[in-house]
């Protein structure tokens, strides 16, 4: 039995439930998916400031997962916050939804475009595409200008706005696939796929299957050098509980 801890690094409980539902929908029946969010940190992550302050809560959830015997982790936010640090703490594999989705996209075609939330998050998406080696494959990054926490608000009409933007991105960019640029869009994936005529990739689903596969294969993060567990050190003040 594989136990995957899917961490929504923001504190919005309803969003965590929706992410958990999408992860469970693709996991094997024998896989246990626990969807959690930190008790401290921003309610949504849509700036560099939010992202930086989401990381301590995320790492606390990795530590809690280690204590609970989790086999692997998904970081369910499209900025892949704290990914490297999480890999240093976790004994099992850790996969971010942006890296998962971008890797999947480049297995399915030459290039992809990303449809995300606010325009201010597009720089982070470009940075991640470059970091993962997909700067050329990323044809466009398009913002729907709907804040993360309004994606599930019926009055925002988000599903249609995002679907329209995906369709126009395919027309404008001529991309082979679309990557959904927010964990809060995971539940839109099937509807939008039916509409746009190219693969539409939700990183929550792909990251869940990747972690499940890596664990099944007995593969985990290398502990040889860079990703070894951090050495013992005191942390002061608000971070004193983070001393390793
Ligand atoms: C996200 C996401 O996936 N979760 C969150 O709080 N912010 N991403 C985004 N582009 O806004």
Image (cartoon, rainbow, N blue to C red):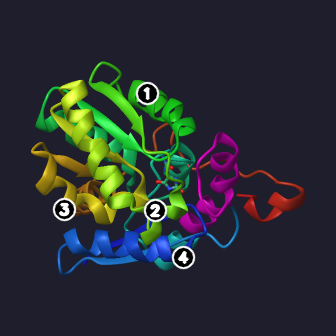
Q: Which of labels 4 and 2 is toward the front?
A: 2
Disc nearer the start of the sequence (4/2): 4
Q: Which residue is drawn at 55% across and 47% down?
A: 81
Q: Which of labels 4 and 1 is toward the front?
A: 4
Residue 239 in the image: state x and y as whole percent: 80, 58
Indicate if the residue with disc 1 has its beta carbon within 8 Å of ligand 1: no
Residue 146 in the image: state x and y as whole percent: 49, 52
Indicate if the residue with disc 4 has its beta carbon within 8 Å of ligand 1: no
- In space, the residues marked 4 and 1 are separated at their CA atoms by 30 Å
Residue that mark 3 sits on: 190
Label 2 packing within 10 angstroms: few (<14), some (14-19), many (20+): few
* Dominant SS in magenta: helix
- In space, the residues marked 3 and 4 are separated at their CA atoms by 23 Å
Res 131 label: 1
Label 4 packing within 10 angstroms: few (<14), some (14-19), many (20+): some
Label 3 packing within 10 angstroms: few (<14), some (14-19), many (20+): few
Q: Is 203 placed left or right of 44 in the picture?
A: left
Residue that mark 2 sits on: 156
Q: Which residue is drawn at 32% across and 76% down?
A: 21
Classify mark 1: helix, strand or loop.
helix
Q: Do the residues labelled 2 and 3 touch (CB within 8 Å)?
A: no
Residue that mark 4 sits on: 13
Residue 244 in the image: state x and y as whole percent: 70, 58
């Amino acid at each position: 039995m594989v136990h995957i801890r899917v961490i929504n690094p923001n504190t919005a409980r309803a969003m965590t439930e929706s992410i958990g539902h999408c992860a469970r929908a693709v996991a094997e029946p024998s896989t246990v998916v626990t969807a959690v969010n930190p008790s401290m940190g921003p309610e949504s992550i849509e700036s560099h400031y939010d992202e930086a302050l989401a990381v301590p809560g995320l790492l606390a959830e990795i530590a809690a997962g280690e204590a609970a015997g989790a086999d692997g982790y998904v970081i369910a936010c499209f900025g892949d916050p704290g990914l490297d640090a999480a890999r240093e703490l976790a004994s099992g594999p850790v996969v971010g939804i942006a890296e998962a989705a971008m890797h999947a996209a480049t297995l399915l075609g030459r290039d992809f475009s990303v449809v995300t939330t606010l325009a201010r998050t597009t720089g982070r998406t470009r940075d991640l595409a470059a970091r993962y080696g997909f700067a050329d494959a990323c044809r466009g990054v398009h913002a729907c200008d709907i804040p993360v926490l309004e994606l599930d608000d019926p009055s925002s009409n988000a599903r249609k706005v995002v679907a329209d933007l995906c369709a126009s991105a395919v027309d404008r960019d001529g991309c082979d696939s679309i990557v959904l640029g927010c964990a809060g869009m995971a539940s839109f994936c099937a509807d939008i796929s039916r509409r746009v005529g190219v693969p539409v990739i939700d990183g929550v689903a792909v990251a869940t299957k990747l972690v499940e596969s890596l664990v099944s294969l007995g593969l985990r993060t290398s502990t040889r050098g860079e990703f070894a567990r951090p050495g013992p050190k005191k942390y002061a003040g608000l971070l004193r509980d983070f001393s390793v």
